[in-house]
Amino acid sequence: MGRFICATDFSGASENAIQYAGEIGQRINSDIVLFHNIDETKEPALVAASGESICPITREKEQKKEARTQMKRLQTYLENGDEDLSLGYKSKISSGDTSQTLATLAQEEHADLVVLASDPSHGLQEMVDQSLTARIIQQVPCPVLVVPGNVTFKPIRRMVLAIDLHGFCPANMSEVLKLAGYFGAQLQLLFVLPKEEPTARQFVEEELERISRRLPYHRISQHIEVNSSVEEGISQFCFNHRADMLVVGAHASNIWKHLLQPGHQQTPSYYPNLPLLVVHPKKIRF
C-alpha cells in the first residue's frame, strides 16, 4: 500500500481522515496525495452587488485561488506534524465531477487506497443511493477507506471481514492482508445467519473454514452471528468484539450503505465507531 489519495473539502472531518491515513502511511512509508475538487455542478450562480452575474471564468479562478491557499495551509500543517519525515505529500486541485476526477486521478497515480471522510453531524445524507461517496466507491479502481469524523486513530488489532458466501471475495485481499499484517491484527471472518438452523450453520462453518485455509494469513478466526438483518448483525458483532475496522466488498452495496446511515434504534450503531474499508470484488474459486 504505497500511495494514498486523501480527498479533502478542508473540513475538520476530512482533516481527521487524512491524519488517520497518515498514521497508517507512516508505518508503511506511503505517499499521500491531497485531493480537492471544485464541483461546478453544485456551485450556485454568484451575483455581484450591482445585480449582475459574475462571469463563470472569474468565479472558477477565485475558487481555485482560495483552494490553493487552503491546500498550502493544510499541506504545511501536515508536513510540520510529520517529525520523522516518513510521509511524502503532494496536492492536486481539479474541477468537474468529483467522482470522475477522483477515479481518473486514482488511475493516473496508481493509487492503492482512496480515503474519504464522513461527518455524523451532517446526518450522512451523502450515504444513500446516487450519493457522492457511493459513486466514488463504485468508480475508483482501488479500495476506499471511509473514516467517520469522530474517530481517532488507534492501532488495528481486530479487523472484521464480512462475507456473503456468494462466490465473491474482495479483489484486493492481498492489500487487506498486508494492512492486517502491518498491525498483527486478528482477521475475523464473519457471516450473518438469518436464523438458527443446524444444517445452515454447518454449511457456513465448512465454507468459512475453506476460505480461511486459502488465505495466506495465520491470524484468522471464523464467526457466525445470527440476526434477521445483515446490517444489524454486523453492527452487533463489531460492537461486541470491539472491532477496529470493518471490511466489506463493494458489490454488497446494500450492506455498506445501510451501515453508514445514522444508527439503528435497537442495536449499537456501527457508523460512529469505526472506519469502513470497501474493496472491489472479483470471483475467486475457494
Image (cartoon, grey):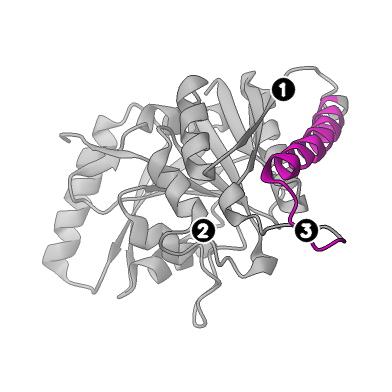
Locate residue 37, reporting x and y percent: 63, 40
Q: Residues within 10 Å of mark 3 (few under 14, many from 20)?
A: few
Secondary structure state at the residue bearing disc 2: loop
Of the image marks 2 and 3, the number of the one nearer the N terminus: 3
Q: Is 186 located above or below residue 76 in the figure? A: below
Above or below, 216 relative to 281: above
Residue at image location 49% in from the left, 21% down from the top: 108
- Cα gap from disc 1 to disc 3, whole angstroms: 41 Å
The quadrant in which residue 8 appears is top right
Determine whether 84 is above or below 25 in the image: above
Mark 1 residue type = Tyr
- Main SS type for the magenta part? helix
Q: Is residue 168 magenta?
A: no
Residue 118, image x, y percentages = 62, 55
Q: Which residue is mark 3?
A: 52
Which element carries disc 1, helix, strand or loop? strand
Callout 2: 10 Å neighbours few (<14), some, many (20+)? few
| Amino acid tagged 2 | His
- Is the Cβ of the residue at disc 1 closer than 8 Å to that at disc 3? no
Residue denoted by label 1: 89
